[in-house]
Amino acid sequence: MAENPDHRSYDELFIGGRWRKPSSPERLTVISPHSEEPIGHVPTAGPEDVEAAVGAARTAFDHGPWPRMEPQERMRKIEGLAAIYGRNLDAMADLITAEMGSPRSFSRLGQAAGAASMIHLALAVARDFPWVERRQGVLGEAHLRRAPVGVVGAIVPWNVPQCLIMPKLIPALIAGCTVVLKPAPETPLDALWLAEMIEQADLPEGVVSVVTGGPDVGEALVRHPAVDKIAFTGSSATGRRIAALCGEQLKRVSLELGGKSAAIILDDADLDKTVAGLKTAGLMNNGQACVAQTRILVSERRHDEVVDALADMMSALHVGDPSDEKTDIGPLVAQRQQRRVQDYIRSGLQDGARLVVGGDDPPADRGWYVRPTLFTGATNDMRIAREEIFGPVLTVLTYRDEDDAVRIANDSDYGLAGSVWTADTAHGLDIAGRVRTGTYGINMYMLDISTPFGGFKNSGIGREFGPEGLDEYVELQSVACNGKLPPLPS
């Protein structure tokens, strides 16, 4: 394609490794959540474009060289992509901030640099992955081979777009799959810039496509009979629909869905360190994080001092232009998201919770901002305690004793993340073992992208990162032999 120095305007789609004119004249306009002004335009893929992308991926998988290469050959291509990506981290961070309002400090470290680390960690996992192995079976020695699952449809949301693309795209490619990527309509620009980098990495034709558009594009990808697996991150409601559609075709599926995580503050916790940790763990990315620790569980004895300390912290947050390095809380991604969060704040008040700081009135005349908001006096049956708000809203809940705290933490449809804050880390580990959730933190919550990530209950199916993340993109073939097998290559 023609040189695109600011990566904010695209006239073509990346289909099968080549830039092609879209079949539809429709365009997506990307709106800045800070200025509410257009910052870019991309094509909207039509049914013919989805068909072309899946067809290219199917041909590349069935007849092309990519799945037939040794894993080490594919990894060398991905290493080349990692080098290209690493030269563009600051610019990628700026683009994400412009697209979806993430504070630049978070876009740089938590998104662009985080995505780069995900590539390198996936490569490190692949170097030690048991692509082939031998086991002693009842009938003699068995040969086990891990083969690519096939054509993968990867569908990602807008909140941390590059960090949600990489744990799908990179393991799938290393495994030998071909991939059709569908980014969120709010954040298509970073995905199409990634396509430019993939083009430079010189992968074989058909291996990667990026199709932009709305839910109809995602549904077409999920329904397509030539797609072997769907990897999705998003809401639990959409995840249920995808699981049902994949079930009809017995299509492989992995789902990373919503969360409503509980931070249990025990009586022996260091309050200053706990509140400083919850500034990030509860409010990262303007509160738009599935792992955000938004239910704050405190004992009756320490309730008042915890609420006061949280209120002081939240009142001091700098809300404003996400491109400003001093900003703690930027705008939400879209006006509908701003209105959704404001509706939750109103529902908390209507249900009888007490507003400590914040509220539903916007802090600025322009931009889709929401004030950092803290509730107390809530019960775990209120909407603000049960539903994923996806904004800078924390809710304090009171427990009687530790058993009650664990009960409240587990009284949720979700099970994605959680944390405990205590001076006794061994006791913290005991608490972690009693909470039904896929990831947990002791005196912190930060996603460790070298360990498996995923949820219990309505928070999803499957895992990303580590060897478990690579396992999601392979099928296991067992070969028995009437005779002696040749030795494995060294």
Image: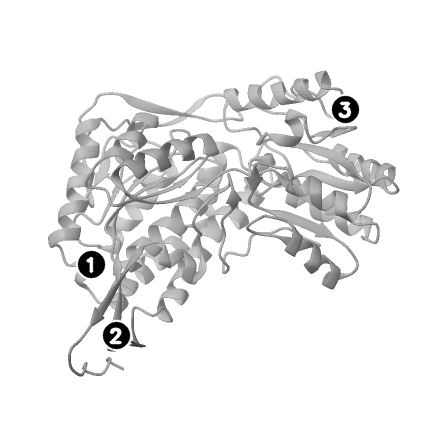
Mark 1 or 2, nearer chain start: 1
Q: Within 10 Å of the Cα at label 3, are there few (<14), some (14-19), or many (20+) other Cα atoms?
A: some
Q: Which image quarter is the C terminus in?
A: bottom left
Residue identifier under label 1: 67
Examine the image and state in which quarter residue 325 appears: top right
Residue identifier under label 2: 142
- Three-letter code for the amino acid on which mark 1 is drawn: Pro
Residue 135: where, in percent of width, then height? 31, 76
Q: What distance separates the C-alpha of mark 1 from that of mark 3?
A: 56 Å
Q: Nearer the viewer, mark 2 or mark 3?
A: 2
Residue identifier under label 3: 355
Residue 291: where, in percent of width, then height? 57, 43
Report whether 432 appears left or right of 268: left
Q: What distance separates the C-alpha of mark 2 from that of mark 3?
A: 64 Å
Q: Within 10 Å of the Cα at label 2, are there few (<14), some (14-19), or many (20+) other Cα atoms?
A: some
Q: Residue at x 29, y 32 (%)?
A: 10
Q: Residue at x 52, y 37 (%)?
A: 258
Report whether 183 appears left or right of 436: left
State the SS at label 3. Answer: strand
Q: Residue furthest front?
A: 138
Q: What distance separates the C-alpha of mark 1 from that of mark 2?
A: 23 Å
Q: Residue at x 35, y 34 (%)?
A: 244
